[in-house]
Image: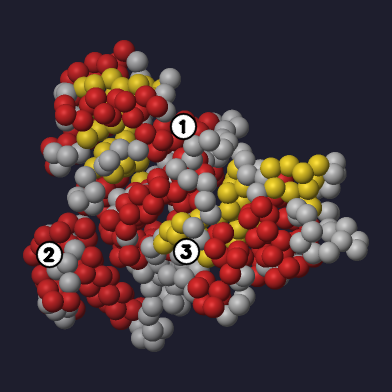
Amino acid sequence: MKSVLYLGCPAAERAETERLLAVESVSIVWADSVAYALNELQRRDMPVLLDLSKGAAALQVARELRSERAATLMFAVVDPRRPDLTTEAVLAGIADVFARPLGAKRVANAIDREISYESRKAGRSAEVFGDALYTHSQPMREVSVLVARAAAMRAGVMIRGEAGTGRTVVGRAIHAAQNGASGPFIQVDCAAHEPDQLDTELFGRAGPVAGEPPGNGPERISRNSRLFEANRGTLYLHNIVEAPTRVQARLARVLRDREALIADTGEITPLDVRPMAAVDPAFETAVKEGRVREDLFRRLSVIRIDVPPLRNRREDIPALANYFLRDICAGLRLPPKTLSRPALSILSALPWRGNAGELRSLLESVASASAGGRGVGLEDVLAHVRLDGGAVVFSNSGTLRQARLRFEREYIASVLEQHKGRISDAAKALGIQRTNLYRKMRSLRIARDRRHF
C-alpha cells in the first residue's frame, strides 16, 4: 500500500478522502503544520499532498517544504475556481496538481508515474504511463463527469474533438475506470490499412464460407484478429470514416450480435467488446453523406463525449505543460526542468491550433535544445515558436526590432485577454511591475477595453 502525507486537508473532508484513496491502496498520514510534516518525513520519506485552499499562505508552506525536502515528491489539491493557483503550484516545484473533487486513481497513477520517472532517469526499465486527464478547467470537469458515467456502462462511446485534444486519453480513462471487464485496450487506425488489410486486421483470415448467403449465422473471426484480442476489453477505432462499407457492415453485425464464430475451432463464442471511436467535429456530416453506416453509428454513439480544444481550456495548460516537460526530460534522461512564469504565461496565451499534441512537440524541441540547463525561460520558448501560422502568426516583413515589437504587442494583448483585462493579474503573469505594464501598453498602443475581455 502506498502512503502519502496530506497537509492542510479540511477536517470535514478527511473521512471521505481516506475512504476514496483506500480503494486505490493509498493510505494517508494527516498533518496540520509544517513542523509536524517535516518530523514525519524525517522518519520516512513519502509523497506530500498539499491543500492549496488557503492560497498564498499554502503556497508559502509548499516553498518551505521544498527548501527543507528538495527531493520529496509534492502534489497539490486546488479549487477549480482558482486556476491561477495551478500556475503558482507548478512554479513552487509541485510535480502535479489535482482539482477537487479528488480522484483516487489520478493520485495513485501520479505517484506511480513519478516513481517511473526516477527509474527511467536511472536507466532502469519502467512502466510507461499514458498522458493524464487534466480537469482543472470547467469544460474538462464536464468531460470528467461523462467519463465516470461511461465507465459505469459497457455501451459504445463516440469521443469527438480536434486532432491532438486527447481523445485517446479520454478513451483510456474510461477503459481504466470501468467495472467488470478487464480485457485489453486495442487500437485500430482504419486509415492506416488498405481495405483488404483492414478486414484482415479486424476479423483475421476468416472470410465467409464459399456459397454461404450473407447474414447466415454469426460473423466469422479468427484468433489472430483484433476483435478476438479485444474480447472483454475495448476496441478503440480511429478514422472509422475511412473503413469500407463491407467492413463497417461486418463490424456493426458483430457488435449487434455480441457473438462470433471462431474460424480456427468452428465454435460460436460470446464476444464482449466495448467499441469506442475517436472522430472529428464533422463526423455527423459523414454519417449524413452515407460514408458511415447508420447501424454502426448507433453502436458507436450510445454515449457521446466532446473534448474541447486546448484554446478553450487554458487553465489546464500550466499543469499539462509541466507534465509533458517532466515526461520528456525523463525519456531523454535529462535533469527535470522547470518552466519560468513568463514561459508558462506565453504557453497559456498561444492559440495551439494543434492542441496538446502541438504543445508537447514544442516542449520536446525546447527540452532537447536546452539540455544543459534546468530552467526553461521565455527566450527558450520563443526560439521554437513557429511564425508561419503555427503557434504565432506574424508578417515576415520589417526589421528584427519591428518583429519583436509586434510579438510583444500581440503577447501582452493575449495575456490581458486571458486575465480579462485585470492589470495586476496580467502583470504578475508577465513577470513585470504594474507600472511597467502600463508603460508598455502606452508605448505599444494597447487599449485596455474591458468589453473585449
Cα distance in 3D space between marks 1 and 2: 39 Å
Task: Using the image, determine if residue 240 lies above or below residue 404.
Answer: above
Placement of the C terminus among the 4 image quadrants: bottom left
| Residue at numbered disc 1 | 112
Cα distance in 3D space between marks 3 and 1: 29 Å
Is residue 403 rendered to the left or right of residue 449? right
Is residue 346 rendered to the left or right of residue 12? right
Disc 1 is placed on an element classified as helix
| Residue at numbered disc 3 | 160
Residue 443 showing in the rendered view: no
Ranked by sequence position, the earlier of labels 1 and 2 is 1
Q: Which residue is at a point 56% across and 38% down the rendered structure image?
A: 181
Ranked by sequence position, the earlier of labels 3 and 1 is 1
Amino acid carrying mark 3 in the image = Arg
Cβ atoms under marks 1 and 2 closer than 8 Å: no
Within 10 Å of disc 2 (Cα), the crowding (few <14, some 14-19, many 20+) is some
Cβ atoms under marks 3 and 1 closer than 8 Å: no
Name the spot of residue 199 as percent of width and height, x first: 76, 61
Ranked by sequence position, the earlier of labels 3 and 2 is 3
Name the spot of residue 258 as percent of width and height, x first: 65, 49
Q: Which residue is at a point 32% across and 33% down the rendered structure image?
A: 74
Task: Using the image, determine if residue 452 lies above or below residue 118.
Answer: below
Q: Quadrant of residue 17?
A: top left
Q: Nearer the viewer, residue 161 or 248?
A: 248
Disc 2 is placed on an element classified as loop
Which mark, residue 422? 2
Cα distance in 3D space between marks 3 and 2: 34 Å
Q: How many marks?
A: 3
Q: Which residue is at a point 19% across and 18% down the rendered structure image?
A: 36
> Which of pointers 1 and 2 indicates the residue nearer the eye?
1
Is residue 429 rendered to the left or right of residue 373? left
Disc 3 is placed on an element classified as strand
